[in-house]
Amino acid sequence: MYIYDQFDHAITKERVAEFSQQVSRRLTGELSEEQFRPLRLMNGLYLQLHAYMLRVAIPYGTLSSKQLHKLADIAKKYDRDYAHFTTRQNIQYNWIKLDQVPDLLAELASVEMHANQTSGNCIRNVTADQFAGVAGDEIEDPRIISEVIRQWSTFHPEFSFLPRKFKIAVTGAPKDRAAIQYHDIGIHIVKNDAGETGYAIYVGGGMGRTPVVAPLIKPFVARADLLSYLEACLRVYNLHGRRDNIYKARIKILVRDLGPAEYARQVEEMWPMTRAAGVDVPAGEVARIAAFFAPPAYDKILEPVAAFTAAKAKYSAFARWVQTNVHPHKVPGYGAVTISLKPIGGIPGDASSAQMHAIADMADTYSLGEVRVTHVQNLVLPNVKQADLFAVWQRLGEIGFAEGNVGLITDIIACPGLDYCSLANARSIPIAQRLSQKFADLDRQHNIGPLQIKISGCINACGHHHAGHIGILGVDKAGVELYQLTLGGAGDETASIGQLLGPGFTSEDIVGAVDKLVNTYLDLREKPSETFLEAYRRVGPAPFKESLYGRR
Amino acid sequence: MAQAKPQNKILTANRLRNGETVYYTAAGEWSPYVSEARIATTAEDADALAKIGAAAYAANTVIDVAVIDVNPGAGAKPSHIREVIRATGPTVRVDLNKSVAPPQR
Ligand code: HEM
Ligand code: SF4
């Protein structure tokens, strides 16, 4: 993985020192809350309902075992022994004390981690496909340009005070595992007709109160030109960006208002200037960065692996877990394991410090010391020998994370909601827990097949409900939590926005309503291989509406 | 909702130093326990609480100051679900919840 250079070290240290000073000045009253608030937000520190919350960046979702151990230590020492992995491939601590933040940040910096670019109106932590570097279908490791972008955007003077926050995601395979079209800029690594690798650029996607699937702005940008093109995209935005209206200041609104073609034209016009400014990274520097992501030393293994085949034959529960939770690896004899942080009835994305330590140990023993965070709030051991999968599964069972439900109906995304979040209208987590219990039966889950439920506690859509095959949005109706259902959203390469079905349901009724939707699907699908999303796209909302609200 | 009496209110905030949810008490202190909150039963009382809150904010003792509704009757019970959750903790981690009243000594 990427090792910080001197410059990064210096900058991170400086930033910790600077923020520590600001915290001291706040505690003595030298800084008012009005003055301090933007500073703390720039450093990933929010105030939630019960305490401060700190969001720590995990650039493109890649962690070393050493870093995960440190994150676990911090959970124990500064929080209440647990933390929350988020859809932004970050980790959040929920019970942080302001006066301990400087010490905490210093500990983070000791493993090259920080909370920069996790909030504020800057270019946020870049997110990427969690199977970067190991997926069989990959064109190029997305972490290389993610790191190039990270270096370019970190503390970029022109882009530290954008009209609004700005999110970039990169995916390296035809299959989009990073929801790129729901980002301000989505980068899809592609090959052109000449067989060269380059980047398709989508601009102006987002969730929130105005969900937009980003249009394709440029089908191919050559590797050498990427940063000048991105800088041109941002500069056009920065020139137009509406700072007067917080809801309108996102680039998605600009691209929509100008029209994608006109926006693209203005970017083309700007491009020669950013090119001339020399922001593009020389090939040698890209190669230097790429070297950090060079494949580790894999063993040469012949498939099939006898021990693995035998274990699957002997233990059907293990075989099933492999089916959902092990992704094909580009190297024969290996697999990429998704650790579901969605035990039945559990809190999606939460892990205790003991669980984090155990996973970090497993990464050392079985996965060449590496861990990934997925935007579905799961973790990945990217490099596990097939011969070790059975041991990994057993160990996961001991720590309560052996649920074989990845991609199934109980692999639910839920934002913190009203249990933690000061902006929430309704609770998200208890709905996820009850749905998980309702659909706990694994036979039924497999029968239902791929189905993504995503839950947000307010319209900010941190739980990606717009992109859920079934989306659930919490609203507040005269002090009562109500839940609206949307159907047909998707966050992959077929991205679409879920459509609202009708009036909301109470907390008591929402689980039954989802059950009805699922049964409706099971009744109308043409064959078991037709997924929920495919069936919905074929028949539209009518039968689902009818199952919930009757004929109108 | 037709209410015979004016809405009862209390003053709440988060402590600057550690973010803890706190309530302003009759003794003039900030307590983590909602049941200790001083209840304003008149509009004038509520205004007085708001002023105290603004002063404590200016003095950098607390942040996120708010005067919130509580149900009628003794013992401050927040009306809105958000404030009920704020008073005790996440409903999904009852093991971490705090009591509405101080532990008996
Ligand atoms: C609890 C503290 C949190 C606060 C106060 C918060 C606040 C917000 C706000 C205000 C927005 C809307 C921004 C906009 O539309 O411009 C937003 C969007 C978002 N947040 Fe959060 N959030 C929180 C937690 C989380 C968590 C835990 C996750 C991941 C699970 C997350 C992921 C996202 C995502 C993916 C978006 C959508 C970005 C977009 O609009 O395109 N947030 N958040
Ligand atoms: S969606 Fe709303 S409730 Fe959920 S974490 Fe985001 S801001 Fe909070």
Image (cartoon, grey):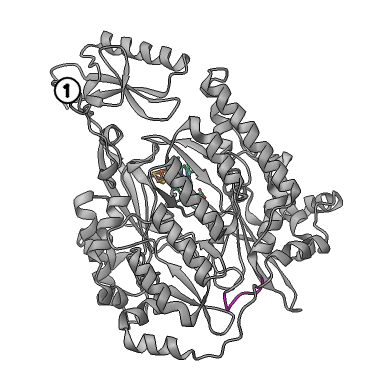
Q: Is residue A304 above or below residue A509?
A: below
Residue extending furthest toward the right: A276
x and y percent of residue A121 in the render?
A: 60, 39
Q: Which residue matches tag 1? A: B75
Q: Main secondary structure of the magenta part?
A: loop
Q: Is residue A136 magenta?
A: yes
Residue depicted at x 24% and y 57%: A434
Q: Nearer the viewer, residue A319 or A82?
A: A82
Q: Is residue A215 left or right of residue A145?
A: left
Magenta region includes residue A418: no
Q: Secondary structure at mark 1?
A: loop
**Residues shaded magenta:** A135-140
Is residue A78 visible to the viewer in this orientation of the structure? yes
**Between A514 and A337, the one nearer to me in the picture:** A337
Q: Quadrant of residue A138 in the image?
A: bottom right
Percent of width and height locating residue A417: 36, 45
Query: In this rendering, does residue A117 appear at all?
Result: no
Q: Nearer the viewer, residue B23 or B67?
A: B23
- Which residue is rendered at x = 39% and y = 36% of the image? A422
Classify 10 Å Cα crowding around label 1: few (below 14), some (14-19), many (20 and above). Answer: some
